[in-house]
Image (spheres, rainbow, N blue to C red):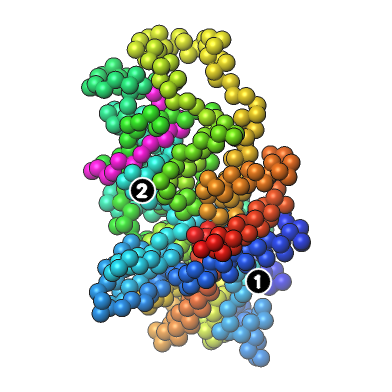
Amino acid sequence: MGIVEGKESIERCGGNGMVFEKIHLRMEYVSPEGLRLDGRRPMEMRQIRAEIGAVSKADGSAIFEMGNTKVIAAVYGPREVQNRSQISNHALVRCEYSMANFSTGDRMRKSKGDRRSTEISLVIRQTMEASILTHLLPRSQIDIYVQVLQADGGTRSACINAATLALADAGIPMRDLVTSCSAGYLNSTPLLDLNYVEDSAGGPDVTLGILPKLDKVTLLQMDSKLPIDILENVMQLAIEGCKAIANYIREILLENTKQLEYRRGV
Amino acid sequence: MRGIQLPLSQTQKVRLQKALEKLESISSKVNSAASVIIADSIPVNHEDGVLKGHGTIDLNGEVVATICGVVERVNKLVYVRALRSRYKPEVGDIVIGRVVEVAQKRWRLDINFNQDAVLMLSSMNMPDGVQRRRTALDELNMRCIFEENDVVCAEVRGFQHDGLHLQARSRKYGKLNRGQLLKVPPYLVKRQKQHFHHLEEFGIDLILGCNGFIWVGEHIEAKDDMVEDQVSQSDPQVLLPNKNCLSLEEQEKNYTILETRKYICRAANAVRVLSMLGFNITLEIIKGIIDLSISMNLDIHEMLGSDFCVLVAEKEVERRSSNKKKR
């Protein structure tokens, strides 16, 4: 229901940028009772769900859901480098992000190499590469494929979380898990984990990726302006979100590892 | 959680769940809470001194896991044994690979490792069995021995500067014919004294490659092949026309009787069921499953059904619990 509402408001005010901004700032994203459009509290995350082993032929794979956003990731490798000239002492990490045609409200035919997906591919690759111990896997390459099956805001974060799970499933050595979450600032309230309607409001949208054990930031993206003191609050909120996701991912991975071990037997 | 992708009815689901729970209770008594995941710190006693092994790093004096797996301790050494990952070769392992490229004096084999493995022409026995220098003519005739996409059995020789090297210096190694290649996760195959098995009652060969590639094929007496090769290999010019018009005798030789083919499929499906359930793959267990399917009068294709899958899980519970009692 939320998606349709948001779309209409954009169309109504398309054209003039000034009008667009005003209408959206006037629109109420947080009700006086402190509830968001989809009924969450400002600091509440959407429901998350993860599943390991979705693609049987891949070395590692996972599905990750955040509310209505659903992403599938598959990892192939470490395997022989396809392009001989790229052989080095470190593993080569490649990433391909794509959106399924049926993932958005209206069916879109997108070319494979559009700017948005190339940018997100790059972001995911760099984030994951920072965590993978590439020096342990010389002369090999790792391919990460992520596809958005259902888009409802925060696809970037969902993709990174799915990729982490898939890499862990593939048995690739990593410094730490990478988890990601987004946060925004609308109606002078910091909001955690924006959905599509809130995302398209045009307000600031901070995507954050952290290494929870090392307490380090590996990804920070924002496409608008925000006063520094407010940014700090928003970032803090996003960090909390990342840690919550990390806890969930750890649970899933531990359960999976235990199951593999006891099924194999002695 | 890694779900078993099979359409299960309600009762089957309950039975499978129960069997898996029993397996968990059996194994949890053996080793408790040794499973770790990425970035878990491993408790160690620093006073005794610690040697950090594979799958661990040092983080502010703590030993931290970098992969998901099981912690193993050998004296001072602490390492994490990965479960689901690619094959990690050890010298002397018997592996099965598929030829991806025929290059200068070498074949490149896909063995489910980080890189392709190299099998040098000089590190394998010539088909005629004579020990001699490999000539340029031998190099030109490399495709007579192995072509692209051939399945080859070999032994891990070790790491050289340009990657992992294999060798095939015995008659038991070489090209594999008339059978099926199965790919399973490598952690399911345990290193044992014997990886070549001949199931006499079915007339099939079973090779459990340490890299998770498993070969099920018709039993072949190695000796006969050698004599036959000697004739053709001595004169490669004769070999080529021979390939096209097989003599009647040779056609007879290339034909696998239906009964054997059925047993090959049965053994292959047994391995498939085991890998689907994530159970250890050994000769004893495979034989047990084949016998079970025969005694139940099941068709070969029914072995991959959900009913048989549940049955195998229940049988495995029985086997493991009886094994425990014996100890």
Q: In this rendered view, identify the residue nearer to me: B97 or A215.
A: B97
**Secondary structure beneath label 1:** helix
- The amino acid marked with disc number 2 is Pro
| Quarter of the figure with residue A220 | bottom left
Q: In this rendered view, identify the residue nearer to me: A46 or B54.
A: B54
Residue B221 in sight here: yes
Residue at the image position 38 percent from the left and 54 percent from the top: A93
Cα separation, mark 2 vs mark 1, equals 56 Å
Q: What range is drawn magenta here?
A: B145-161
Q: In the picture, which quadrant includes the N terminus of chain B? A: bottom right
Q: In this rendered view, identify the residue nearer to me: B162 or A182.
A: B162
- The amino acid marked with disc number 1 is Gly
Residue at the image position 25 percent from the left and 74 percent from the top: B49
Residue at the image position 45 percent from the left and 79 percent from the top: A239
Disc 1 designates what residue? A6
The image position of residue B62, as x and y in percent, is 31, 76
**Residue A168 in the image: above or below residue B93:** below
Disc 2 designates what residue? B89
Residue B179 in sight here: no
Tag nearer the camera, 2 or 1: 2
Q: Chain of mark 1?
A: A
